[in-house]
């Protein structure tokens, strides 16, 4: 604990003179007889600055998480501290989504009064936002061609070099992958969980086929054929989980990001989340999914704001505006693999029983 080193003055500590002297509306600078200062430009600046401050805090927490998470051994106590910081990021994201309402108290007509003064500046150039995206696990190569051009093309040399450097460090997605791959329990001397799980799936799919056959009296040939075809698709999806080659193909097509081993172990955590040793890993996975979902909500909310302000006009950064932002919301997902795991969940009653020796290892009273 630090001890007091002498009197501190509120304004000095928070550097308020610097902070509060940093709102400089361009419409004030260029005011003339025809065009005066636009009242709402102050709101526009303050809201953006508040966003950037919260981005700074998110990066501060993300950096601290990555420092621990990139290690190959993570003690239990560190894991709970990671989850605690992720929970904080979630709370901040709630504010980020809520704040758009304040900006929407500015009408599109009020925005039009000063919008042209901003060209070609744009949120495209928010280096901190890009840094968050990258540190979470969104790589330049994950972006569509046109977006990639927007991503780097609008930045200064210095900012581009900085982000290129950031891209070389481990991301949360990569750290998660390594950590999941190291999870014990699924393939031990006593127990091969995946062989047992596959047997359960086979049983479930066989039952499904029998149900379709048994009910075929009520179905037309076409309906029966369709249901059996759907079952084949489900079987194919499960196959893609267990066959390394199929999994690699999906990674190659950008349809999956995590390694097969990491995905299987994440699924194990979800299936047996109530076992003591899996409770914290389950919270970690859930927090990452929440963060991904919150960023997606932020993107959709921001796209709606842009539509409200601009209609179908292009953005100050030159993109198609609302259309671009909606596409980014659909595509820029980092932890989508975790969401897709729900495809492979099965009822608890059909889960393979874990042998006592393995169960003991997964409980705190060993
Ligand atoms: C009047 C309010 C706003 C409008 C009309 C608006 C519009 C846009 C548009 C059209 C884009 C696409 C790039 C372009 O062509 O310029 C964009 C990107 C962006 N804006 Fe905004 N924006 C507004 C407020 C904000 C606020 C408050 C933030 C908070 C920091 C923000 C952050 C961003 C970010 C980070 C991007 C890049 C998104 C990406 O590439 O995925 N914007 N904005």
Image (cartoon, grey):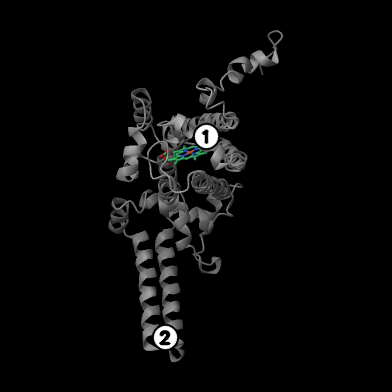
Residue positioned most to the right: 7
Instruction: Categorize mark 1 by other alpha carbons within 10 Å: few (<14), some (14-19), many (20+).
Output: some
User: Residues at badges 1 and 2 in contact (C-beta under 8 Å)?
Assistant: no
Q: Is mark 2 within 8 Å of ligand 1?
A: no
Foreground residue among 270 and 132:
132
Res 158 visible: yes
Q: Is mark 1 within 8 Å of ligand 1?
A: no
Count every numbered label the image shows and give the total. 2
Residue marked by disc 2: 213
Query: In the rendering, at what x and y percent does residue 19 appear?
Result: 59, 20
Foreground residue among 193 and 81:
81
Residue positioned most to the front: 33
What is the spatial separation of the Cα atoms under label 1 and label 2, in whole angstroms? Answer: 67 Å
Task: Give the structural element (helix, strand or loop) at label 2.
Answer: helix
Q: Is residue 227 left or right of residue 85?
A: left
Residue at 47% x, 55% y: name it. Answer: 339
> Within the image, what quadrant is residue 221 found in?
bottom left
| First-in-chain label (1 vs 2) | 1
Position of 362 relative to 67 (above/below): below
Quadrant the N terminus occupies: top right
Residue at 42% x, 42% y: name it. Answer: 173
Residue marked by disc 1: 113
Res 75 visible: no
Position of 299 relative to 39 (above/below): below
Q: Is residue 5 left or right of residue 291?
A: right
> Within the image, what quadrant is residue 243 found in?
bottom left
Foreground residue among 361 and 123:
123
Query: In the rendering, at what x and y percent does residue 321 appear?
Result: 42, 44
């Amino acid at each position: 604990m630090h001890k007091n080193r002498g009197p501190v003055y509120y304004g000095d500590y928070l550097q308020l003179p610097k902070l509060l002297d940093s709102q400089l509306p361009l419409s004030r600078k260029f005011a003339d007889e025809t065009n005066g200062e636009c009242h709402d430009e102050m709101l526009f600046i303050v809201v953006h600055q508040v966003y950037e401050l919260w981005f700074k805090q998110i990066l501060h927490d993300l950096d601290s998480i990555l420092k621990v998470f990139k290690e190959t051994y993570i003690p239990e106590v560190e894991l709970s501290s990671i989850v605690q910081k992720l929970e904080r990021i979630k709370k901040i994201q709630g504010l980020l989504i809520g704040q758009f309402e304040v900006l929407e108290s500015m009408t599109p007509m009020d925005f039009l009064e000063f919008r042209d003064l901003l060209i070609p500046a744009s949120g495209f150039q928010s280096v901190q936002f890009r840094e968050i995206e990258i540190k979470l696990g969104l790589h330049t190569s994950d972006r569509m061609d046109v977006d990639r051009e927007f991503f780097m093309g609008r930045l200064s040399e210095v900012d581009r070099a900085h982000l290129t450097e950031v891209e070389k460090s481990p991301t949360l997605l990569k750290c998660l992958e390594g950590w999941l791959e190291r999870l014990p329990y699924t393939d031990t001397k006593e127990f091969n969980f995946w062989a047992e799980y596959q047997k359960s799936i086979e049983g479930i799919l066989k039952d499904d086929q029998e149900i379709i056959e048994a009910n075929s009296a009520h179905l037309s040939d076409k309906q029966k054929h369709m249901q059996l075809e759907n079952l084949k698709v489900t079987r194919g999806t499960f196959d893609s989980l267990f066959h390394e080659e199929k999994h690699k193909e999906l990674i190659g097509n950008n349809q999956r990001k995590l390694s097969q081993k990491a995905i299987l172990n994440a699924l194990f955590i979800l299936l047996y989340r109530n076992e003591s040793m899996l409770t914290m890993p389950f919270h970690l996975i859930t927090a990452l999914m929440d963060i991904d979902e919150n960023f997606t909500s932020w993107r959709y909310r921001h796209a709606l704001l842009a539509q409200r302000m601009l209609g179908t006009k292009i953005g100050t950064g030159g993109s198609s505006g609302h259309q671009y932002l909606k596409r980014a919301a659909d595509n820029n997902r980092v932890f989508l693999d975790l969401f897709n795991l729900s495809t492979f969940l099965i009822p608890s009653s059909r889960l393979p029983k874990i042998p006592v020796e393995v169960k003991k290892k997964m409980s705190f009273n060993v």
